[in-house]
Amino acid sequence: MIGRTNFLVGLMIMVVGLSLAGPSLITSVRFRPVVGTIVDAFAEATDDGQVRLAVVYEFDILPGDHPAHAGPVVGLGYARCDRFGQLLPDLVLSDAEAERFINQVRAGRAQSRVYYQPGDPMHTVRAEIRPGADKLFLSMPHLGLLMVLSPPLTWMALLILRRPWKRTTSDEER
């Protein structure tokens, strides 16, 4: 059958995969991730001489998530999040960094992942503001799920290939 070492290695791979995919799975239960477009950014002066950025983003509310709103919505907010949808502190930068960020946003319409809760999308919206946030191909959650599923599938394939339940007549004669 499956050796003890193969089983333990597979189990360790599954635990690592679950730790990679777990936070994103929890977020996908609480929030709906959609791809949005960062339209503009505005700077607001803070007391310590730096600036706090507010980002204007456009995203689609999926049908059925809110009775009054469906389709494209424009949101202005400070709420930004990491790739798991967890809130991060406000984006506070120096004047030069803020000006560079605003120029980059205004030069091209960057894509970003936007999260909202289906029952209350207007008050729970948050955007992931980082380079490559719109890339939905093989992110950490996808890699984690792949790591969780690959050992059991490998074990099943090994069992099928070895077919311990089928004995040939030459095996019975021995």
Image (cartoon, helix red, strand yellow):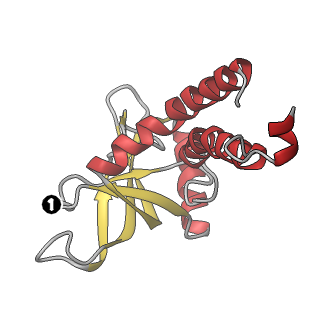
Q: Is residue 96 left or right of residue 40?
A: right
Residue 107 location in percent, x, y?
Answer: 61, 68
Towards the viewer: 12 or 64: 12
At 69% from the left edge and 42% from the top edge, which residue is drawn?
159
User: Does any portion of residue 160 appear in the rendered image?
Assistant: yes
Q: Is residue 85 visible?
A: no
Q: Is residue 42 above or below residue 162?
A: below
The residue sitting at 41% across, 30% down in the picture is 49
Residue 45, percent from left and from top: 36, 40
Residue 63 sits above or below residue 36 on the image:
below
| Residue at point 55%, 70% (across, down) | 109
Q: Quadrant of residue 6?
A: top right
Q: Position of residue 2 (x, y in %)?
A: 70, 29
The crowding category of the residue bearing disc 1, from other C-alpha atoms within 10 Å (few below 14, some 14 to 19, many at least 20), is: few
Numbered disc total: 1
Q: Quadrant of residue 173?
A: top right
- Foreground of the two, 151 or 134: 151
Q: Residue furthest front?
A: 173
Which residue is situated farthest in the left direction here? 67
* Front residue of this view, candidates 21 and 91: 21
The residue under label 1 is: 119
Give the secondary structure at mark 1.
loop
